[in-house]
Amino acid sequence: GENVEQHPSTLSVQEGDSAVIKCTYSDSASNYFPWYKQELGKRPQLIIDIRSNVGEKKDQRIAVTLNKTAKHFSLHITETQPEDSAVYFCAASWDKLIFGTGTRLQVFP
Amino acid sequence: KAGVTQTPRYLIKTRGQQVTLSCSPISGHRSVSWYQQTPGQGLQFLFEYFSETQRNKGNFPGRFSGRQFSNSRSEMNVSTLELGDSALYLCASSLMPGGQADTQYFGPGTRLTVL
């Protein structure tokens, strides 16, 4: 069945460093890849997404890359700040969203 | 526009009982998806409704069911509750159904505790 694997499960970085989270998906028909950020006690919120006809997308300090051949996509956060600390979820969709198990990012001042 | 709302926010039930959770989507959104969130398991897809029809269903037992009304509000029901049903239940709404690469907006969730 459809599956999304996400790594690492936890990630600790120093403020100002970069953070990279990687996901692989199993359904080659997937055409939409959003990333959500969930702060403690809050709802998941979309931070960036990419569609299958695009290889890379940037939004200020956040970027996502997609390799459809290898069926993997990654989230890159540059110049991390303490407020980036949260759980990040990747997802892949063809007819429904399948989520990865999340990455807890901690940014230390 | 008002965001996605869910009621109640917290529920405590005992094993064997049943529970109904409600989700009101963003005005104009016709698709509502439900997810179960537990520590270590991430968000697991329960089902999706679009225009009052169930479009898709995840790998959950038949004790989990849902419906959608003509105003797009959705409810999910869990019968014969088990301890393992304790979780945060999130709903998300979007304009288009799954497969249309449309953004899903999440509600705050209902925290269900089964004792």
Image (cartoon, rainbow, N blue to C red):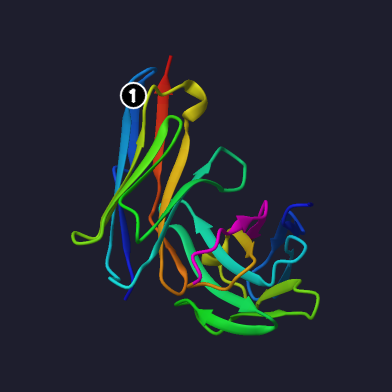
Q: Quadrant of residue B27?
A: bottom right
Q: Does residue B2 appear in the picture of this structure?
A: yes
Q: Is residue A12 left or right of residue B56?
A: left
Q: Is residue B13 left or right of residue B35?
A: right
Q: Is residue A8 left or right of residue A97?
A: left
Residue B109 located within the stretch drawn in magenta:
yes
Q: Is A23 above or below relative to B30?
A: above
Q: Amino acid at mark 1?
A: Val
**Coordinates of residue A81 in the picture (x, y in percent):** 46, 21
Q: Residue at x 57, y 38 (%)?
A: A40
Q: Which residue is mark 1?
A: A13
In this view, which residue lies farthest toward the top? A109
In which quadrant will I find the C terminus of chain B?
bottom right
Q: Residue at x 51, y 80 (%)?
A: B57
**Coordinates of residue B59 in the picture (x, y in percent):** 44, 77
**Coordinates of residue B110 in the picture (x, y in percent):** 68, 57
Q: Describe the element under mark 1 as helix, strand or loop.
A: strand
Residue A104 located within the stretch drawn in magenta:
no
The boundaries of the magenta stretch are B100-113
